[in-house]
Amino acid sequence: MKNIALLAGGFTGEYEVSLNSAKNIAANLDKTKYNVYTILVNRDRWFYEDSSERFDIDKNDFSLTVKGDKIKFDFAFITIHGTPGEDGKMQGYLDLVNIPYNTCDVTTSAISMNKAYTKTIVHGIHGLNTAKSMRLFKNDGHDVANIAAALKFPLFIKPNNGGSSVGMSKVYTVAELPAALTKAFHEDDQILVEEFIKGREFSRGIARLHGKITVLPATEIITKKDFFDYEAKYSDNETKEITPADLTPQKDAQIAEILTEVYLRLNCKGMARIDFILLEDTLDFYFIEINTTPGQSSASLIPQQVRAAGMSVPDFYGELIEGNM
């Protein structure tokens, strides 16, 4: 039996979402192979809870002592959305204590959390387009006239390092810009102002399974809201998710090729989820972002896509452990 530390929680507004992800992963890991310990990560302590008793992680060697028994971990399964589980910080710590984990390495995790850097790296992949954008820093002056002159409305304003759609706005006029900038800067010191791409929105998982890069079926996201914001993402009645998406076999194969190239170019490991838009008239592929610690509640996109691919969710999670040990 292998001891698995399932790391959940984190320091962002997605704390609860992370706990739901952890519940689903724990329920789907093979009990005959793995002893799973859910470790909650807060700013002040990392702990395991057993019938309302809390046991702290010894950060010197990432071990746990429960009622006199010292537990050493064979593997860490990170399901923290945002910092410190998605941005490379936890990966750096686990590298130092020599514990293997399920996600991308430090460099890729840090880069892929930064939307602007990611766009720079994937730029030039055949068939991939990105929206025209500007990056703004909190300490600089922000002349809305310059933004309006450089980019075409409507615009998306979003935190550069956020993974969760918190702090995003869509604006149609110069007058709306100041409030949208303030909202995004509340979440991050760097923000991205991006031209709005009109088309069908999709999200698609990709993972290395049994040594081979596997692209999962696509999900089309149809939202009643103006865009797929945090509320639309986590409230049932705002959004329809269609898995597998209605795509021609040719388009499906072309997208899988582009996503594989993104995964390779960013040096991803484990599973990732890539969001993209197919332009309204031409169906040109526009890259939105990559998520290297995607949500894993039972209704989340990756579990939906794993089931649509005819795979079992327990086998999928098991392979993320076995393939990275």
Image (spheres, rainbow, N blue to C red):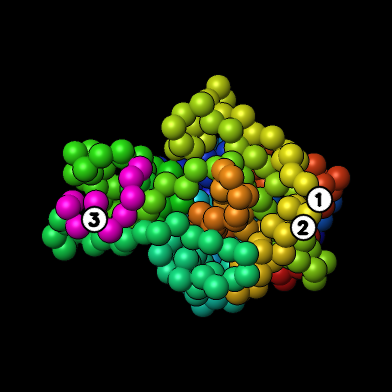
Q: Is residue 155 above or below residue 129?
A: above
Q: Nearer the viewer, mark 3 or mark 2?
A: 3
Report which residue position mark 2 lands on. Answer: 253
Was residue 6 drawn as part of the magenta stretch in this picture? no
Mark 1 or mark 3: whose residue is earlier in sequence? 3
Quickly name the residue at label 3: 149
Label 2: state its secondary structure. Answer: helix
State the SS at label 1. helix
Quadrant of res 141: bottom left
Asked if the stretch drawn in magenta spans residue 149, the answer is yes
Question: Looking at the image, do the residues carrying marks 2 and 1 touch, with CB atoms under 8 Å apart?
Answer: yes
Tell me which residue sits at (69%, 35%) in the image. 242
Q: Which residues are magenta?
A: 144-154
The percent position of residue 29, horizontal first and vertical second, equals 75, 49
Disc on the earlier residue, 3 or 2: 3
Disc 1 target residue:
249
